[in-house]
Amino acid sequence: MYTLGIDVGSSSVKSSLVNVETGKCVASAFFPKTEAKITAVNPGWAEQDPESWWENMKLSIASVMSESGVSAAEVKAVGISYQMHGLVCVDKNHSVLRPSIIWCDSRAVPYGQKAFEAIGRERCLQHMLNSPGNFTASKLAWVKDNEPEVYEKIYKIMLPGDYIAMRMTGEICTTVSGLSEGMFWDFKEGRLADVLLDYYGIDRSLIPDIRPTFSDQGRIKADVAAELGLKEGTPITYRAGDQPNNALSLNVFNPGEIASTAGTSGVVYGVNGTVNYDPQSRVNTFAHVNHTAGQTRLGVLLCINGTGILNSWIKRNVAPEGISYNEMNTLASKAPIGSAGVSILPFGNGAERMLENREINCSIRGLNFNTHGKHHIVRAAQEGIVFSFKYGIDIMEQMGIPVKVIHAGHANMFLSSIFRDTLAGITGATIELFDTDGAVGAAKGAGIGAGIYSDHNEAFATLEKLDVIEPNVAKKQEYQDAYQAWKHRLEKSMAN
């Protein structure tokens, strides 16, 4: 018996097939093999053709089914993870009306900011727990104003995962978690966010039906089953945005549990058991995968734009030519904790929500030409990334989320011992590294939704823990001193 997980990203679409009995991934594949095309007609825009997601999904499913040798009848359920905040518009024939406006498109920023001011900061945060920002509702408001001929034809709007599910089953539905990531959900009232829909003049009929995150959300049609090489009637039993799904993949379900990623950008995602928000709206709060009317489970998402992208920039422009990332880590280890006074503010990849949407750019502080070398700069880059995580984690702790254990995949920046040791040392948290990814998580989510697993504990009982990093208590003060120096420079920069 197997479950299939599909992860629809902006770079590629990945599929993974998981053996239910062993919990192991038996095959996985992603397409395209080079980064998927993102169209930018104007500066700040980012669009993708939903048909490209479908075609790449077909290729990835065909590959895993061929590689595994598993028959279609053995695949009992499908789960979908997807890039968050995208907007897909379809007409009554389920035809796409325009390219999807994806998560990194910033055209709707002025719409969200104007709504935040007009509705009122406190009212927005009390009801939606976030600023309307650049989320899906604001993207739809942009379409309404700028492409009225498109808006008039819209039958339903969807998130990317909803679209893939629609193509498979012919049914259009979404989840509370999905609605919350688009700013369509009112947590105070427990229903659609009338406060924002009324402000934007959005017709409620455009919002899909709501299904539980773990439930039968439709079954694969006969013609689609033939196209995909799957069995007719196979149910889709789980869907979630990429960050809630990443947390699920790491078995993060309960208050105080934390998931983190550190790829191009960095994310810390913590589960809160009470309805709460940051008064300065420096983090995002969405319904987690197991949030229900009777059980509050909110995902508090901290995002740092300049994580792995800073480390790769240092590799290309500062480190010795041809050096590997492992060799960079060895070079950085020659510098002491605190990089002998060098601090790097890692904010050179756009405006940072954590800094109240300021764009302060990346800067190197404390550099002395007579005493500092490449090893200090390489280490300071990694420390700067970690310290930005700590700055955001402090915000999360103020919201009532104690950070004691951080779950992460064994990938990207978490492959660096300096990064891991610094993060554990400055937060005081134990870091646990696991062998998993989003598509595998979606497959296990499907198993939960189909009732194959009794609960998440059974689904993730076989999750393989690769490493545990405990805080170095003896070096706690060194980490604290380095962080305080970095924080002082950050706050001074923000004040200018």
Image (cartoon, rainbow, N blue to C red):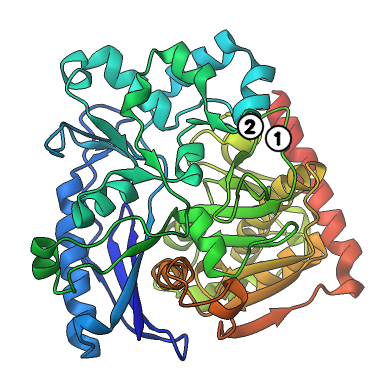
> SS for tag 1?
loop
**Residue 166 spot, x, y in % from top left:** 24, 49
Taking the image as shown, residue 247 lies to the left or right of residue 440, namely right
Asked if residue 210 is positioned above or below residue 318 in the image, the reply reads: above
Residue at the spot 22% in from the left edge and 29% down from the top edge: 155
**Residue 291 spot, x, y in % from top left:** 60, 50
Asked if residue 45 is positioned above or below residue 53 in the image, the reply reads: above
Taking the image as shown, residue 376 lies to the left or right of residue 148, namely right
- Along the line of sight, the residue nearer the viewer: 196 or 173: 173
> Badge 1 is on which residue?
277
Residue at the spot 63% in from the left edge and 39% down from the top edge: 283
Q: Earlier in the sequence, mark 2 or mark 1?
A: 2
- Along the line of sight, the residue nearer the viewer: 129 or 393: 129
Residue 129: mark: 2
Point out the residue furthest to the top here: 118
User: Disc 2 to disc 1, how far (Cα)?
Assistant: 5 Å
Taking the image as shown, residue 487 lies to the left or right of residue 234, namely right
Image quadrant assignment for residue 172: top left
Q: Residues within 10 Å of mark 1 (few under 14, many from 20)?
A: many
On the rendered image, what quadrant is the C terminus found in? top right
Asked if residue 349 is positioned above or below residue 238 in the image, the reply reads: above
Residue at the spot 50% in from the left edge and 54% down from the top edge: 243
Three-letter amino acid code of the residue under disc 1? Tyr
